[in-house]
Amino acid sequence: MKKLLTLNLFLTTCFAGIAQYNTLKIPDTLSGTTFNLTIKDTFAQLKTGNQTITGAINNNNFWGPTLIMNKGDVVNMNVTNKLNDSTTVHWHGMHLPAVMDGGPHQIIPPGTLWQPYWTVKNQAATLWYHPHLHEMTQEQLTKGVGGFIIIRDAQEAALALPRTYGVDDIPLALTSRRYDASNAFVYTNCSYGDYMLTNGTPNAQVNLPKQYVRLRILNAEMERAYNLGFSDNRNFYVIGNDGGLLNAPVTVNRMILAVGERVEILVDLSADAVGSSIDLKAYNSGFSLGFPGGEPATSGQFGSLLNNTTFSLLHINVIAAKPNAITTKPTTLINNTYWTAADATVNKSVAVTNGNPGGTPFNLDNFTFNINTINKTVNLDAIEKWTITNNQVFGHTFHIHDVEFKIVARSSGTINTYESGWKDVLYLPKGETATFVAKFDDYSDALHPFMYHCHFSPHEDGGMMGQFVVTAPLPLSLTSFNAIKEKENIGLSWTSEQQINVNSFIIERSYDAKIFENIGSVNTSTKEKDTYSFTDKNYQKANAAIVYYRLKIVDNDGKFVYSPIRTISLNNAATTDYEVYPNPATNKVYVNLEDASNSAYYITIIDAKGRAVMMLPQPNIGAGIDISPLKSGNYFMQLIDKKTKTTTTKKFVKN
């Protein structure tokens, strides 16, 4: 009995010592080529007292499953929105068509299924997915909607790295939350949380084996940056940035991880005693105003109990090593070939503007986001250098969709070695500039844009965003070509440079994108660079839904090239003819376009109440559309064709 009492006292003492910690939740995984994601409202017990209303995916109560994909696979996503609000899902860091990207344009109404698909072209990396609905991003991220994506490839698989998910390969989503008196999340007029959540776990702890372990860390905050380090000041080893593995591990004992950034690190626990513990911490004390989370206030919109303090992110308990443990780190990783400033043929700039208290909110280039405005145009396959300049108000992170980039310059003079790999987010301190180079390859779409923006959710919701389209490249002499409907006329404008050998521009018009007619010409000026315009007053044609324009660029020898085509919708009653069959249908419907050379750009299926129930970007209509989940009844198919971008609606019946 005395031994039993002694044992009970020992166990009670041990558990009392760790009672303040909760076991870290490791997100479940989905793998393969088809991923079913259901976004929903739910509840979680995060504090004593009331449960907190949260948002999550599938069977989770905060966050969602980790999606594991292989480079080269074609992945099909079935995203069902069961929230009470519309949402979007952005595949952050993924290189994919703009129409599949999940930005503010690809809105998923409540009760609707969205089915994007793409070929995984990214190398092995840690990406993530999250909502991107304009003016709702902070609210939905605060609720906990999001998840990791892990991409695997042959290069990564050949390395001796920890990769047993949940054992020695751990994803960590770092964020914090503020609660009101009823334990509800606060997301209005709130830039920072007061209490850490790591993978949705308050006061998280994890057991890790006595060997090298791999942490995939995401800053999933609203605004706060983290100065990462360990409680014993040990070195750790950065092996990957946002876009994948570095060429070799980089040794650090502190590093800044700002909002939206990911980092993969190796931590050597082989010399730690079993039963010992260390903390992964944010060494955020002592930063000056302008560092995200450096504000001195403990309450209010820009205050927090965590501001300008050092605090724990994860408590790590060391346990016995696992079989086949990784006990050494590789000296080299993979052989990346990075773009340099000399590779860029186009220079672009973006300036952070406004943001002073009481004035216009932060925006980019003095322009607040407008979903109908394209801010920049990029030529397909262009290698571009972008310079981002911050003002003197506050630090930010800058994220661009579609591509991974290489940072080539910072005005501070130093590019941190831990950010030397492929990136899609960069931290931009107050008053500094950063320059990156990227290639915009594989995907062009003049209709659906990609985004660039500050990744602080309150800032992007407030309009600190721009958008760009990637289009087929313009001929050498053209730097822009636009068509705009102006009341009763259509105005064409274009800018030409390096035009010393250009003689004239012939303007051509078509109503079917096949047969073009000459409607006028403009001679070039003697300037090296100039802007031209032409007004078409006679474009109207019975039953025409679209008018197409192109420039025939003629040189001094009579040789010519054509510009890309620009289109204007005339809003007439022309349609794209197609058949939906079988009708009625039970499991699948097929689409037969009258014009066999055409294809479906977007299909939306609407129920009898006018509610969108399925959204299919660029569907493979030859394989049919699975309608088996739909209830019996009448439905309407809205098809936007790829050639003319007109919308035509057909009715069908689901048995």
Image (cartoon, rainbow, N blue to C red):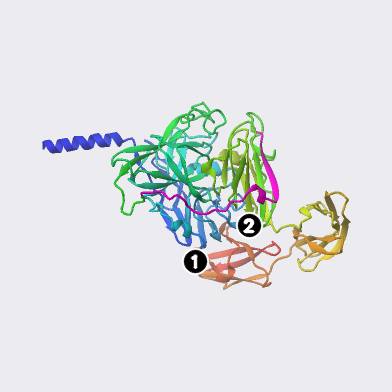
**Label 2's element?**
loop
Q: Are marks 1 and 2 in contact (CB under 8 Å)?
A: no
Q: Residue furthest front?
A: 331
Q: 530 or 106, which is in the foreground? A: 530
Q: Position of residue 406 (x, y in %)?
A: 59, 47
**Secondary structure mostly taken by the magenta-highlighted segment of the chain:** loop
As shown in the figure, which amino acid type bears the numbered disc 1? Answer: Ser
Asked if residue 276 shows in the view, the reply is yes
In the image, what residue type sits under mark 2? Asp
* Residue 540 makes an appearance in the image: no
Q: Is residue 546 above or below residue 220?
A: below
Image point (87%, 63%), residue name: 557
Which residue has dot 2 on it?
Answer: 441
Residues 314 and 385: in front is 385
Against 220, residue 523 (above or below) is below
| Towards the viewer: 164 or 631 | 164
Q: Residue furthest left?
A: 1
Give the residues in magenta.
Answer: 327-354
Q: What label sits on residue 628 in the rendered view?
A: 1
Marks 1/2: CA distance? 37 Å
Residue 363 spot, x, y in % from top left: 65, 38
Q: Earlier in the sequence, mark 1 or mark 2?
A: 2
